[in-house]
Image (spheres, grey):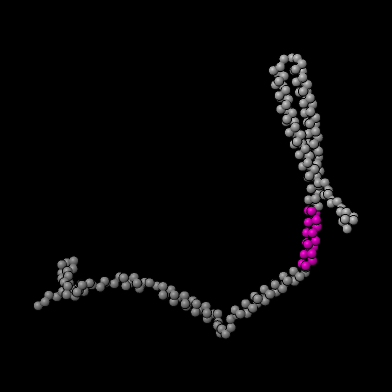
Amino acid sequence: MNRIFGRGKPKTPPPNLSDCIGNVDARSESIEKKISRLDAELMKYKDQMKKMRDGPSKNMVKQKAMRVLKQKRMYEGQREQLAQQSFNMEQANYTIQTLKDTKTTVEAMKIGAKEMKKAYKDVKLDQIDDLQDQLEDMMEEANEVQEALSRSYGTPDIDEEDLEAELDALGDELLLDDDSSYLDEASAAPSIPEGNPSDSKTNKDGVLVDEFGLPQIPAT
């Protein structure tokens, strides 16, 4: 079939602003290099004219310099035009990219709004209120169960007046138990004599006393 009808030409991609900007910038750089070469040539002619006397030779060099200067002006004009074109395309490209980003953002917001609506359909406030009421009822029932389990039973009835009387008597007994006056009497009692009973001691008057502090009776 290709031999009979031939092959179709491949479709070239549509022009792209970014590619166009790159091409214009490349042309601008090429012109900038040409202007630099012309500047170097002008400086050479200018140095020659400084060293030459007035005459036909100097006028010839001057004509060459004028021709190079005209070329430089022409290239400078082209450079300015390309720079303006590049700037305009960059502004257009920036605007297009901004619009694309805005479109993407709007589409994402629409999708988010749909998802939020779908999610809200699954959430019903009445069900949430009912669930809260059920939880509250269950907590009250749990408290009632705890109170029932902690209820005391099998305890005999006791008169409160008897309990108060026993409590007052218990207080008096505790006070008696806390009385430590007998300790003071015990500390005031005579100390137990130390040493063996056969040891002889004298009192302050020089009289011999026994182990109990009594005067000894002389043996007959």
Left or right of residue 192, residue 16 in this image: right
Q: Is residue 172 magenta?
A: no
Q: Residue at x 17, y 67 (%)?
A: 205
**Which quadrant of the structure image shows residue 174?**
bottom left
Q: Residue 33, percent across and down?
A: 73, 33
Q: Is residue 183 shown above or below 99? A: below
Q: Is any atom of residue 199 visible in this view?
A: yes
Left or right of residue 142, residue 194 in this image: left
Q: Main secondary structure of the magenta part?
A: helix
Q: Quadrant of the N terminus?
A: bottom right
Q: Quadrant of the C terminus?
A: bottom left
Segment tinted magenta in the rendering: 104-123
Residue sitting nearer the eye, 92 or 204: 92
**Which quadrant of the structure image shows residue 214?**
bottom left
Q: Residue at x 18, y 68 (%)?
A: 203
Residue sitting nearer the eye, 35 or 51: 51
Q: Residue 137, percent across and down?
A: 70, 74
